[in-house]
Image (spheres, helix red, strand yellow):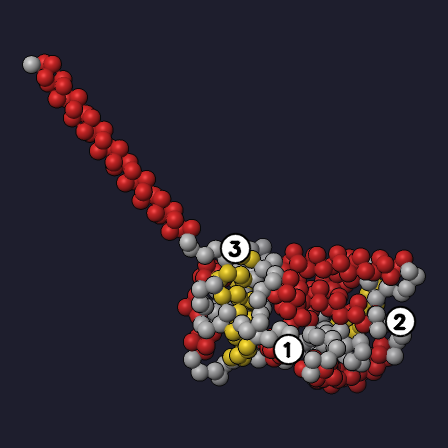
């Protein structure tokens, strides 16, 4: 009797073991399915403007070293800073430091916020005539009593390394050699270096400013680039629907977090130009930079995306250096 009970118990244990084994396979199978499901979720990649800008600065420094070795004069950039706006102070300081890093000469000219428009224009004209100077920028914004358009038009097109002069804007639009404004040039260089396919791509530019939106839309649609470009702005109807069709989104509207996940199709490339200071009590400065794209919700839907900071911003600065190097070679 005891032997039969042991035998029955053994068979039950064996059946139980088989059930456990089958259960384990079911569990394993379900785990594999979950793993496979996760592997099918597209992972976004970062378009690293900070890293790319550092590489370009290295290339520029090498070119400047060749100029020095050949007995040539190194590029010289001058910046005029009117008043003491905090953002302008920081940006100009970065430009001066960038010049030092690549071996350029730089000159910073400070003028008080009370300077008259005519006094500023006279200084610009003086620098236009300086043969030792290759590039000239006047840091914007300017005090309200000075018309920015007059200042921009007074800078010599040959020294307008910001690319704002109407002559340079017109030549860029016509596809002729010119100084292209720094942010659009930086965006195009990023897309090129990351091998983002542009030919035939549906590109939506969000924003129509003269500094970013309009020029980058022209550059994207030029022959040889061949993207199909739509520009949307504050008066565009069904703006989210239009953006949702884009293979590439250039967000340059100046509204933090404007582009949300529901506006972005799966696999899109997103370039965030926005750099707005927003309150951040948890930071030492009390603020942080926020882009026009809601990064946390949008990034998982993208194939490629630029961060803020560290995306377009560093490329804007390095594009100014490239323009200055180009001016020195003329």
Please say if the residues under marks 1 and 2 sit with CB atoms less than 8 Å apart.
Answer: no
Q: Residue furthest top?
A: 2
Q: Secondary structure at mark 1?
A: loop
Q: Of discs 3 and 1, which sits in the foreground?
A: 1
Q: Of discs 1 and 2, which sits in the foreground?
A: 1
Q: Nearer the viewer, residue 172 or 132?
A: 172
Mark 3 and mark 1 lie on one chain; the one further toward the N terminus is 1
Task: Say left or right for 252 vs 316.
Answer: left
- Residue 126, labelled with which disc? none
Q: Residue furthest left?
A: 1
Spot occupied by residue 58 in the image (x, y as percentages of width and height): 75, 56
Q: Quadrant of the C terminus?
A: bottom right
Question: Which residue is labeled 2 in the image?
Answer: 132
Residue at x-position 42% and y-position 80%:
238
Q: Secondary structure at mark 2?
A: loop
Residue 284 location, quadrant: bottom right
Q: Is residue 277 above or below residue 160?
A: above
- Residue 223, labelled with which disc? 1
Label 1, residues with CA under 10 Å away: few <14, some 14-19, many ≥20: few
Spot occupied by residue 115 in the image (x, y as percentages of width and height): 77, 80
Q: Residue furthest right?
A: 71
Mark 1 and mark 2 lie on one chain; the one further toward the N terminus is 2
Please say if the residues under marks 3 and 1 sit with CB atoms less than 8 Å apart.
Answer: no
Question: Which residue is labeled 3 in the image?
Answer: 282
Cα gap from disc 3 to disc 1, whole angstroms: 48 Å
Residue 199 location, quadrant: bottom right
Q: Nearer the viewer, residue 247 or 296?
A: 247
Spot occupied by residue 215 in the image (x, y as percentages of width and height): 64, 78
Q: Secondary structure at mark 3?
A: loop
């Amino acid at each position: 009797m005891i032997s039969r009970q042991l035998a029955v118990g053994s068979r039950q244990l064996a059946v139980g073991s088989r059930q456990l084994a089958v259960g384990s396979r079911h569990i394993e199978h379900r785990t594999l399915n979950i793993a496979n499901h996760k592997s099918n979720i597209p992972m976004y990649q970062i378009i690293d403007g900070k890293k790319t800008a550092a590489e370009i600065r290295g290339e520029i420094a090498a070119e400047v070293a060749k100029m020095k070795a050949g007995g040539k004069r190194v590029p010289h950039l001058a910046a005029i800073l009117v008043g003491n706006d905090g953002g302008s102070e920081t940006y100009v300081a970065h430009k001066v430091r960038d010049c030092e890093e690549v071996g350029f000469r730089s000159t910073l000219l400070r003028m008080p916020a009370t300077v008259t428009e005519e006094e500023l224009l006279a200084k610009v004209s003086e620098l236009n005539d300086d043969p030792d100077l290759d590039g000239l920028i006047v840091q914007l914004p300017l005090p309200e009593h000075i018309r920015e358009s007059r200042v921009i038009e007074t800078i010599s097109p040959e020294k307008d390394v910001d690319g704002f002069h109407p002559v340079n804007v017109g030549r860029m639009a016509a596809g002729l050699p010119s100084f292209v404004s720094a942010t659009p040039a930086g965006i195009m260089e990023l897309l090129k270096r990351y091998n983002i396919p542009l030919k035939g791509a549906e590109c939506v530019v969000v924003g129509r400013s003269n500094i970013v939106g309009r020029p980058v839309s022209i550059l994207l649609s030029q022959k040889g680039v061949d993207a199909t470009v739509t520009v949307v702005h504050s008066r565009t109807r069904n703006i989210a629907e239009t953006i949702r069709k884009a293979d590439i989104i250039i967000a340059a509207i100046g509204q933090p977090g404007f582009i949300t996940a529901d506006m972005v199709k799966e696999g899109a490339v997103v370039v965030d130009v926005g750099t707005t200071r927003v309150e951040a009590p948890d930071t030492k400065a009390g603020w942080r930079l926020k882009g026009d794209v809601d990064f946390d919700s949008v990034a998982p839907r993208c194939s490629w995306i630029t961060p803020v900071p560290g995306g377009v911003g560093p490329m804007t600065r390095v594009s100014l250096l490239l323009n200055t190097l180009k001016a020195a070679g003329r």
